[in-house]
Amino acid sequence: MKSVIPGTLQSIPQGKNDDNSSKTIRWCRVKHQYFGDIHDYRKYGLLRLLARIGGLRIGLAWMLTPDDYRADGGKIDYLTSPDRWRRADPDLFDFLSGTVAKGSPRNLSTFENASLIPQAVYHSDLLGDKHAERTTYMDSMISRFSELDMVFFDPDNGLEVRSRPMGRKGSSKYLAISEATKVFGAGKSLLIFQHFGRVKREAYIPAQMERLGLATGAAKIVALATPNVLFLFVLHWEHAVAVDHSLRILSERWPGQFTKTSMTAASLSASVQA
C-alpha cells in the first residue's frame, strides 16, 4: 500500500544504496504505490466496519518506509469491475475509483483527509531500521494513540522474521513481536497486516496466532485470511465483543472474501500443553 509519488520527498540522509555502491542517496521518496490496491480495499473496508459497526476508536500506524524502487503497486483491476466489487462498500469503492482509477496521485494523505474511518487517528511518520529510530517511532505513536481502543499496524511485510532482526537493514518492513507486546501492554488491542509468503497456510496461520498469544497474553486472537494477506487481531476482552459483531457484518457484506480463525487464551493454553 505504499509507493513512489512524484514530489513526495522526505529529507532523510541515507548511507550506501542497495547495490553497495558508494553513491549516497540524500533524499528518498515515501512509498505509496500500493495505495488503493485490492488489499487496501479489503483492509479499509474492514477498518471501516470496526469503527462504524463496532464503535472502536482506531489508530492507524502506516509504518512508512523509504522507497525501495520496486515496480510494485498494481492489483487495481478490481476497480474496473464495479458490478462484482462495489456492493461490499459502495462509498469506499467510489472513493478509490475516483482517485486511483482516474490517475490521481496515489498518496495515503488522500485517504486520511477523506475521513472514511470515523474517529481514526493516523501516525504517518517514517520508520527507520535503527533501534533508536524504532523506539522513537513507537513511543510517539503510543502517545498519539493514548485515548484509542485499537492500533492497526501496516508493515510492508508483517511480523518480524529471523533473517531481519530489529536493527538490521530492511527490518523496518516488519513489526517486532516486542513492539506488538509493548503496545498491547499499553491497553490497546491490535490489528496487524501480514503478507503471506511461500508457506503452508494451514500451519502458518495457527503458528502466528500462537506466537502473538504467547507473547502478549491476549484474551483472544483472531485471524482473517484473504488470498494473499492475513489480518491478525490481538484482543483485550473489552474489545472482543465489538470485533466479533463487526466480523459478523463483514461476512455478510464481503461474502467469500475473508476466512476467519479464532483462538482464545484458554484454547491457546490447551494447545501449548498438548
Image (cartoon, rainbow, N blue to C red):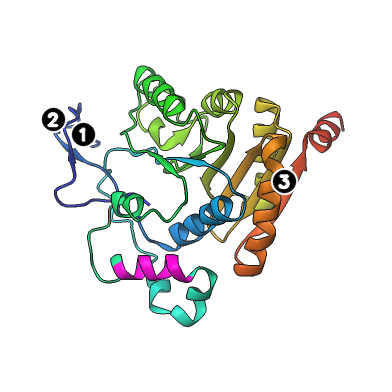
Please state the horizontal and vertical placement of residue 39, each as a whole percent of the image.
Answer: 46, 58
Sequence-wise, the earlier of marks 2 and 1 is 1
Going from N to C along the chain, the mark reached first, 1 or 3, is: 1
Find numbered disc 3 in the image and state the secondary structure of the residue it sits on: helix
Image vertical order of residue 239 relative to residue 168, above or below = below
Left or right relative to 43: residue 1: left
The mark closer to the camera, 1 or 3, is 3
Q: Spatial distance from mark 2 to mark 1, Cα to Cα?
A: 7 Å
Q: Quadrant of residue 103?
A: bottom left
Badge number at residue 24: 2
Question: How far is disc 2 from disc 3 in space, using C-alphas?
Answer: 51 Å
Q: Secondary structure at mark 2?
A: loop
The segment highlighted magenta reads: 90-98
Judged by depth in the image, the label closer to the viewer, 2 or 3, is: 3
Q: Is residue 196 above or below residue 80?
A: above
- Pinpoint residue 240: horizontal percent, then vertical percent: 70, 42
Say which mark, if any, is on residue 241: 3
Decide if residue 237 is on the left or right side of residue 171.
right
Pointer 2 with pointer 1, Cβ within 8 A: yes
State yes or no: residue 97 in magenta: yes
Of callouts 2 and 3, the N-terminal one: 2
Element marked by disc 1: loop
Magenta stretch contains residue 50: no
**Position in image of residue 30 (x %, y %):** 25, 42
| Image location of residue 243, percent across then percent down | 66, 48
Residue extending furthest toward the bottom: 83
Direction from residue 97 to residue 274 in the image, left or right:
right
Label 2 sits on what residue type? Thr
- The dot on residue 17 is 1
